[in-house]
Image (tube, rainbow, N blue to C red):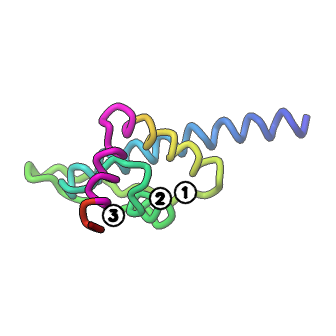
Amino acid sequence: MGVRDFLKDFAKDIKAGYEVGEKATYDAKKRRGSYRHSVFDPRFAKDMFEGTEGYTTAAGTKIPATRKLNNPAEFLGAYGARLATDLGQDSSRQFLGVITIQWL
């Protein structure tokens, strides 16, 4: 039973992390227009470890903050959300292109 419970908790944590990562990615795009969806952007990891602040939209809607992640399984789920967004928008190639140009 111990292994079964571990796997259930692991799957639940990955799903919870995915949801946090998905919301943090969406919120970051709305708050910081220059925030990239790349898996290489260090601000994403920082947001996951520290949580994000809530904000109010221009229309006056309050968006709640995201919580910080609790364990490695949640972090894995959050990066899964980030990777899915990255693949859909080709952000890592663009992010690395900007970094390369800046170094030249």
For the residues carrying marks 3 and 2, which lies nearer the camera in this image? 2
Q: Quadrant of the N terminus?
A: top right
Upstream in sequence: badge 3 or badge 2: 2
Residue 71 image-quadrant placement:
bottom right
What is the three-letter code of the residue carrying label 3? Answer: Glu
Residue at numbered disc 1: 69
Q: Residues within 10 Å of mark 2 (few under 14, many from 20)?
A: many
Q: CA distance from mark 1 to mark 2?
A: 6 Å
Q: Nearer the viewer, residue 74 or 37?
A: 37
What residue range appears in magenta? 85-100
Tell me whether circle 3 and circle 2 mark residues in contact (CB < 8 Å).
Answer: no
Q: Nearer the viewer, residue 93 or 48?
A: 93
Asked whether residue 74 is drawn in magenta, I would say no
Determine whether the residue tagged by mark 3 lies in a helix, strand or loop: loop
Most common SS among magenta residues: helix
Q: Nearer the viewer, residue 46 or 68?
A: 46
Residue at numbered disc 2: 48
**Residue most toward the right?**
1
Q: Residue at x 70, y 41 (%)?
A: 10
Q: Quadrant of the C terminus?
A: bottom left
Q: Residue at x 56, y 37 (%)?
A: 15
Give the x, y percent position of residue 77.
Answer: 55, 42
What is the three-letter code of the residue carrying label 1? Answer: Leu
Q: CA distance from mark 3 to mark 1?
A: 14 Å
Residue at numbered disc 3: 53
Tell me whether circle 3 and circle 1 mark residues in contact (CB < 8 Å).
Answer: no
Tell me whether circle 1 and circle 2 mark residues in contact (CB < 8 Å).
Answer: yes
Upstream in sequence: badge 1 or badge 2: 2
Determine whether the residue tagged by mark 2 lies in a helix, strand or loop: helix
What is the three-letter code of the residue carrying label 2? Answer: Met
